[in-house]
Image: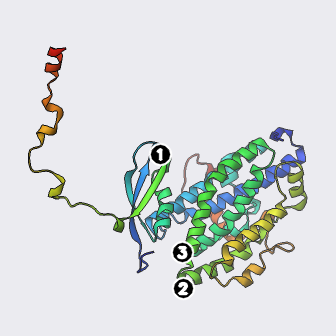
Amino acid sequence: MTMSVTDLSPDVRDAATAFLLAIADDEFVAGHRFTDWVAVGPTMEEDNALASIAQDELGHARLWYEYVADALDGDLDDLALNRPASERRNTVLVESPHEDFAAAIAVNVLYDAAEVLFLEALHDGDVAEIAARAAQALNEEAFHREHADLWLDRLTATEEGRARLTAAFQEAIPRAADLFAFDADRSEALVEGGVLARPVSDLAVDWAATVRADLDGSPLPLDETLEGIEPEGAPAQNGRRGEHTPALESLVTQLHPDNVVGDHPINRYQP
Amino acid sequence: MADDDRLEPYEVFVQWRRGKPHEHAETITASDPDMALHLAKRNVDVRGEPVSIWVSPRAAMRTTTGDDTTLTPSTDRGYRSVQWYSENDVEERG
């Protein structure tokens, strides 16, 4: 059964707006962190690939911010650029700067696996406008997953790569604990209302299985880290509730340098 | 992967339209063929919407040198050309 956003009850519509704003924030912050690689990637070719992934994620962010801007009668630029860290609902997984190339690959593995699951559940949902946007974003995810898989194989081929990847995953996996930690009642409303084809809790189980499948076969000593991957109880820090690390604060500050003049949208920011 | 774990040059050939030949587009530096193809996907002008991409390690290619005399015949082979058939003759007979 296909329906339109206007067919949704006000509660479900609000839940969808909140959920998609969180997904947009994920994409925006993840994309922004990948842009940090521009001009400093390990090779020129990889630099372009990372920049392209960044551009894709920022494009996906735009898709969802546009939807939210419509729903809230808000402004696209203000949503993306001019919200303080405390108002953002992205997972803390994507907040940290990529200190190392292995950190970029760890985020690539963990985050894109989750993104695909979110997008598929939205795409298989009943709301035409939302499913169409998800289809657009899903198109580009195949390349992101391929990028993660290929680099995982190659970085685990050397001792240095294994050491760096192990450290990166040990740091990143605990931060991924809030990926699916959305408000339970609202998540249920999204499934009942037809926005999501599957419950968020199912997506969490699938995500853990995907990450295990990616990493179990690798020679990385991550057994202990992976034990904590199935979320039990509330995460220590939940970006879905606005609990963020200082890294997000600094990202928002970076977005607002004080030397941009004129009517650029960032000049509307009032921290 | 190369024996010494170094990156290698790969030549990239792109087909821009169905039915057209693959054209040499650029050189990619990569560790192995799969990575070369992956990187090529986002290192050609993707706004041009390529139909298909081939990569080949440069080491697998054989090329002629600039002054290769075996490429051009030294004797006159003009008799093979159709230039000796006169259009005027055809018209006169017709």
Looking at the image, residue A84 sits to the left or right of residue B19; the answer is: right
The type of residue carrying mark 2 is: Glu
- Residue in the image at 69% along x and 82% along y: A222
Q: Report crowding for label 1: few under 14, some 14 to 19, many 20 or more residues within 10 A (C-alpha).
A: few
Q: In this figure, which residue is indicated by the disc labeled 2? A: A159
Looking at the image, residue A257 sits to the left or right of residue A202; the answer is: left
Tag 3–tag 1 contact (CB < 8 Å): no
Separation of marks 3 and 2 at Cα, in angstroms: 11 Å
* Image mark 2: chain: A
Indicate the position of residue B1 as horizontal and vertical percent values. Answer: 45, 74
User: Is disc 3 in the same subunit as disc 1?
Assistant: no
The type of residue carrying mark 3 is: Arg
Q: Secondary structure at mark 3?
A: helix
Q: In this figure, which residue is indicated by the disc labeled 3? A: A154
Q: Report crowding for label 3: few under 14, some 14 to 19, many 20 or more residues within 10 A (C-alpha).
A: some
Residue B48: give its label. Answer: 1
* Image mark 3: chain: A
